[in-house]
Amino acid sequence: MNFTTRLVLLAVFACSTTAQSSSTYSKASFVPPAAPSITKAGWPSAANHPSRVQQQIATGYGTELFGRKKNAGGSSGTVKTAGVPPVSKNGKIQIKMLTSVPNIGQAGDIIFVSSAVFQNQLQRQKKARLISAEEVANLEAEKQKEEAEATQKAVDTKKMMEEVMFESLGEECSTDQDICGVALTMKRKAGPEGNLFGGINPKMIMEELANTFPDGSWEGKQVKLTAMKDSDGKDVKKKDIKHTGEYTCVVKLGNDVDVTFILSVVAEE
């Protein structure tokens, strides 16, 4: 094979290779990148977004407010009154505690808390509920009525004891004394000199008052013995009575209602 033939074969091979390359590969075209999508990190769902929570609290939607109304049969029952806006003050909402929660409130308390505390700590665990202004007014009216009734019972109890003291007045009672007339008598075993076999404490006195005046008002935390002095004017409230004699006692029966009476401790025969 001569030189010319070789050149022809090389040219043919080069042409076939170029044609094959052009048919297999094509020039790549530029594709612009897609615009990046920006996602804001936030609350898991739109329903829990703070703005929506504030709107629900303001309108009462999604919360349970309760009221009392009579049904067709005349009996009263608990009904939902959603949509009634709660009472708000200084960015806080008014609620009623259903159970006692440390550092927040006791069961039955009506207090103001932040919406976050109510939503996250109290409402989910059913430890508190929202309360409307109308319900607060009704509760205040009921409270005032109960206080008025308790005060009247305290006044009646005081009058009852004073009548007994007046009936027990004797010749030894003078007008110079601040109080006279025995309202309560307690008998105890005592020695020849009047020393009691066992003392008398304030709890025993209150129990004896309840037994002696069963129609009196003796219930409630406000009812308690506040003072007790012997015939010499010495305070013996912090100590048990150890001797027979007459003692001046003061019992608080209610708001601004106190009764002062004579307790007579005598020896059993």
Image (cartoon, rainbow, N blue to C red):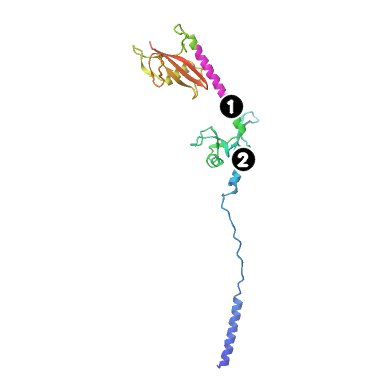
Say if the magenta span includes residue 13: no
Examine the image and state in which quarter residue 145 appears. Answer: top right
Q: Residue at x 60, y 46 (%)?
A: 47
Mark 2 secondary-structure assignment: helix
In the depicted view, which residue is nearer to us: 163 or 174? 174
Q: Which residue is mark 1?
A: 142
Measured as percent of width and height from the top left, residue 30 is found at 61, 69
Q: Residue furthest bottom?
A: 2
**At label 2, which amino acid type do we have?**
Ala
Query: In whole angstroms, how far apart are the C-alphas of marks 2 and 1?
Result: 27 Å
- Sequence order check: which comes first, mark 2 or mark 1? 2
Q: Is residue 20 above or below residue 142?
A: below
Measured as percent of width and height from the top left, residue 84 is found at 63, 37
- Predominant secondary structure in magenta? helix
Which circle, 2 or 1, is nearer the viewer?
Answer: 2
Q: Which residue is mark 2?
A: 58
Mark 1 secondary-structure assignment: helix
